[in-house]
Image (cartoon, grey):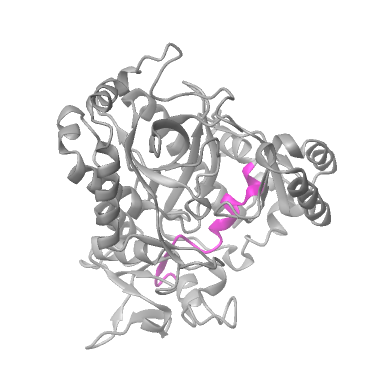
Amino acid sequence: MTEERSFFNEMLDDAGNPRSSYAKLAQWLEDKPPNFLKRKSREAETIFRRLGITFAVYGAEEATERLIPFDPIPRVISPGEWRRLSAGIDQRVRALNAFLHDIYHRQEIIRAGRIPADLILQNEAFLPEMVGHDPARKVYAHIIGTDLVRVSENEFYVLEDNTRTPSGVSYMMENRETMMRLFPELFQTHRVAPVDRYPELLRQTLESVSPNQAKSDQTVVLLTPGIYNSAYFEHAFLADSMGIELVEGRDLFVDNGKVFMRTTRDPKQVDVIYRRIDDAFLDPLTFNAGSMLGVPGLFDAYRAGNVTICNAPGTGIADDKAIYAYVPDIIEFYTGQKPILNNVPTWNCSNEDDLAYVLDNLEDIVVKEVHGSGGYGMLIGPTASKRQIADFRKVLMANPTNYIAQPTLALSACPTHVASGVAPRHVDLRPFVLIGDQVRITPGGLTRVALKRGSLVVNSSQGGGTKDTWVLED
């Protein structure tokens, strides 16, 4: 896709005039001297370097630790737009949790013929070990990152539901903190909904699903794979912000069906584990026997109801890209309502007719791995070379069940600081949702921006950046 192709400009209308939510920001940008944003971008980079806000790039030959590029021009969302988005997100996350409870119990949605049994029962993200288990408050996915894109003034689509271990919330918070340091005058002229309560609300959510509600002080820990994980900065950031311990598997042990944390004094029983490691590595006695990251006996302690794991093992089935196409049916089945937010039309390459269509139209569509993430293993047809399309065709035909395909959307664009000045660049949005005793949606979320002209790939691992997201209050 090139920038000549039609796309929705979030700041300017068709006549080139600022939309009402952007009016003050547009005037502020107009009044600034040419090098102002360049100077502020350098200041932001200095702040991020000092704080150590980095991410790891696996398989890169250059240095593995990188700064995520930060764009100093905020994305603005009006109060009305946010009300619709948050209502759609609320509906979606409740339905996904109902779906998870159902497939690990009576499997009514399969019995009703609304979703093929093999798509769930033969899916590697489905954990038979979770069948029959009731997590606290029947919540499976406690932290969800819902990826949204916009294609017109009133059209938003959900790209995917991140129900395993969604990341990026630390960048959302640090982006806001940096903006408040750099441009305090902007916050005096805009009523921007705050995001700084996220760690407090996250801890409240985690404590609300403790199996030991009678305890006055819940012991919550964040389980990390360690310093070499790409999101380790975020793990440390969140643990520190919540005032809880950041632990690795070796810091925990199971005794008499309960989980304990080693301390300099006596061991302390753990009530809730906010895990940032994948299912397979949680417990070498139940899952991957070679795992050095997990805790032997952890899953038995969890099944016994003596500790809560957030997100629950087996939640990955809800954000599997093969299941994604059925989410509108899932919402209708469990809520009796039509989806407020639409899915992107999807072709499942395990279906012969869908595969035939995809193979005939590779140059016009986007093809993704079912279990892929981070922008890896995908083909964006309109920007791919003939050689790339030919090579991908062979890979797709060799293993079609591993792929889904979608039309290339004309993603909306926001004003972004680039080398030549200010220009529109394509964006997506990841709002963060907390589900425990209630559903809590942080206003805004993480806006990711494709910094290359015409690019649709917003992932930081593929050269994308981030910007602050402002939800205006009434």
Please tell me whether residue 366 is drawn above or below residue 152 in the rendered image. below
Question: Residue 108, can we see it?
Answer: no
Residue 424 vs residue 281, the one in the foreground: 424
Residue 5 vs residue 395, the one in the foreground: 5
**Is 319 part of what is drawn in magenta?**
yes
The x, y position of residue 350, in whole percent, is 79, 48
Q: Quadrant of the N terminus?
A: top right
* The quadrant where residue 205 appears: bottom left
Please tell me whether residue 239 is drawn above or below residue 300 in the rendered image. above
Taking the spot 42% from the left edge, 16% from the top edge, the residue there is 13
Range covered by the magenta-colored residues: 305-324
**Is 116 part of what is drawn in magenta?**
no
Residue 152 vs residue 101, the one in the foreground: 152
Taking the spot 33% from the left edge, 48% from the top edge, the residue there is 172
The x, y position of residue 162, in whole percent, is 51, 50
Taking the spot 78% from the left edge, 52% from the top edge, the residue there is 391
* The quadrant where residue 67 appears: bottom left
Q: Quadrant of the C terminus?
A: top left
The x, y position of residue 376, in whole percent, is 61, 55
